[in-house]
Amino acid sequence: MLALNILETYIVPPLEEPIRLSDLRAGTFSLIVSRKAFTKLIKANLVLVNNKKSTTATPLLGGEIITVFRDQTPSNKPSITIALEVIYEDEYLAIINKPPGVEVSGNKRYTITNALDKALKKSNQKDALQRPEPIHRLDYPTSGCLLIGKTASSVMKLNRAFQEKKIDKVYYAITIGNQKTSGIIKVPLEGKSCISHFKVIDSVASIKYGVLNLVKLIPETGRKHQLRKHLAAIQCPIMGDLKYGNPNATGQGNGLYLHAYSLEFKHPETGVVISKTLQLPKKFTRIFKQIRL
């Protein structure tokens, strides 16, 4: 049986002409980040109009009471144990150090998502989630800062912050080849505009690879594999990137040299700026020994 709690209610103001339920403007609900997200809730039977079931085509004339629910039914997904480093946690959210070689989510059993309920403390907030949720994704081979939501409201607000580019992310990578000191990569991906900023912090000669660079990366957009694709596009692929780089440049089998170094954002509930960083992995500092970021 479903366990439903009210997420939000809204009274439709007077309308000049009828509209469909799914055509309510974005921002109508403070905790629903987009019309697409609202449509998903309607299709999941989590939206009532005047306490009656609704569809996306349900007409609104004005004066209707719309009630949006959240599903708190206990999950039947597996719960596993992964030793996760928690670098920040409160009642609403957490930041963990994602290890490389683990999927954030998906159909597999061994994922970060399936380990969060054991790795994090249970929130005492009224809208606490049964299972904490990752707010964004890091690739399977990427390590570093991963933001987690622990309540329904924090997940909604943090998702909106990502959409509005209000969460600052910094990555570091080791790239191969002669790379300009700094620049902006604007190669479109998936038919959409895509922007990445880079700055070379240091370079060292390599007998095997020619030149290796420690590069600071700031993605302005968030497409799948954006940084990996962009660096490959300028002929300076990330070391260990077997998919987009040189399959022979394996970095002695140490995986992908890409690390999510920091996150900075305003706390969705308190407004306090949260700024957290993670040291570079040892495989980075073995190559760039004297670097202080």
Image (cartoon, helix red, strand yellow):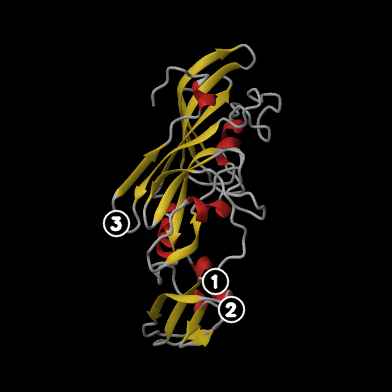
Query: Which is nearer the N-term, disc 1 or disc 2?
Result: 2
Q: In the figure, residue 187 lies in which quadrant?
A: top right
Q: Which residue lies furthest to the right in this view?
A: 248
Query: Total label count?
Result: 3
Q: Which residue is drawn at 44% across and 68% down?
A: 26
Residue 177: x percent and y percent? 58, 20
Residue 17: x percent and y percent? 44, 85
Proximity of marks 1 and 2: CB atoms separated by less than 8 Å: yes
Residue 80: x percent and y percent? 59, 52
Of residues 76 and 227, the one drawn nearer to the viewer in this rendering: 76
- Quick check: 242 above or below 9? above
Give the SS element for disc 2: loop
Query: Which is nearer the N-term, disc 3 or disc 1?
Result: 1
Give the SS element for disc 1: loop
Residue 247 seen in the figure = yes
Distance CA(mark 1)–CA(mark 2): 7 Å
User: Can you identify the residue that label 3 sits on?
Assistant: 270
User: Can you identify the residue that label 2 sits on?
Assistant: 1
From the image, state whether disc 2 or disc 3 is nearer to you: 2
Q: Which amino acid does label 1 sit on?
A: Thr
Q: Which residue is drawn at 50% across and 41% down?
A: 195
Disc sitting over residue 73 in the figure = 1
Proximity of marks 2 and 3: CB atoms separated by less than 8 Å: no
Q: What residue type is labelled 2?
A: Met
